Amino acid sequence: MDFFYARISSSSQNLGRQLVEARKLGITTEGEDLFIDEQSGTSFNRTGFIKLKEILKARNLDGSKGDVLYVHELDRFGRDYDEIKKNIVEIESYGVNIKFMDIPLIETTDEATNKLIRDQFIATLSYVAQKETEKRKERQRQGYNALSKNSEGKLIGKNGKVVGRPKKPLPKEFGGYYELMQKGDLKATEVMKILGVKKSRFYEMKKEYEDKINN
């Protein structure tokens, strides 16, 4: 049976190319022969990937079924050098043949030579994938450190604006709830439920409101 694993790191990326390749192979049913994750490649603790491995292992307990796992590109499989090697060995130990579609198929008359060439390609591409991730993180760290801060200690971008999500305004009705809490008619936990906010956000709003009425 043929399987396909696809991965993107975030919703801003597009699964299109990977799914097109899967359809060409006749693989179309997510959760059965198609497994998808939206998660970083540096971790292999991914829901879709774990489920895929469980299915491949269970199917091949009584001997190899001749299953084939297709992955469009090696860096879709993962971006950690050691974890890539570890998971390839584990899956292939089930009797599953993994085909990375970006690694050229080189066939010689000697099976050991074929495996050696393939392993060298995988090792090289795994190394490149990990280094790309490390460089990207380093650039992000350098960019973060280069940002200046305002008087409140918040990071300021090149455009002069505060970096990050804009602060949500206080709900108009918060003042009324605050007064009811002061009178003992409402508990803080009840206001949290009414507003649909977590404890940390509630106390941020409470402090903001108190600063507002005391200034």
Image (cartoon, rainbow, N blue to C red):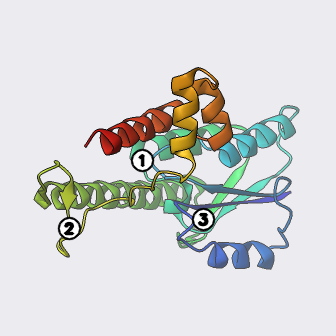
Dot 3 corresponds to which residue? Answer: 109
Give the numbered dot on residue 17: none
Image coordinates for residue 204, horizontal then vertical, percent:
41, 38
Of 167 and 147, the residue lying toward us: 167
Type of the residue with mark 3: Thr
> Sequence-wise, which precedes: disc 1 or disc 3?
1
Q: Find residue 104 and report its image quarter.
A: bottom right
Image coordinates for residue 97, horizontal then vertical, percent:
70, 53
- Horizontal placement of 74 versus 191: left or right? left
Q: Residues within 10 Å of mark 2 (few under 14, many from 20)?
A: some
* Residue found at x 44% / y 53%: 79
Q: Residues within 10 Å of mark 1 (few under 14, many from 20)?
A: many
> Sequence-wise, which precedes: disc 2 or disc 1?
1
Image coordinates for residue 61, horizontal then vertical, percent:
84, 32
Q: Find residue 71 and report its image quarter.
A: bottom right
Q: Find residue 105 and report its image quarter.
A: bottom right
Spatial distance from mark 1 to mark 3, Cα to Cα? 32 Å
Spatial distance from mark 3 to mark 2, Cα to Cα? 59 Å
Residues tagged 3 and 2 counted as in contact (Cβ below 8 A)? no
Q: Up-down: is 169 above or below 23?
A: above
Q: Which quadrant of the figure contains the N terminus?
A: bottom right
Q: Up-down: is 78 above or below 45?
A: below
Can residue 198 be seen at all in this image of the molecule?
no
Spatial distance from mark 2 to mark 1, Cα to Cα? 31 Å
- Horizontal placement of 9 versus 26: left or right? left
Label 2: element kind: loop
Label 1: element kind: loop
Camera-near label (1 vs 3) is 1
Dot 2 corresponds to which residue? Answer: 157
Type of the residue with mark 1: Asp
Dot 1 corresponds to which residue? Answer: 80
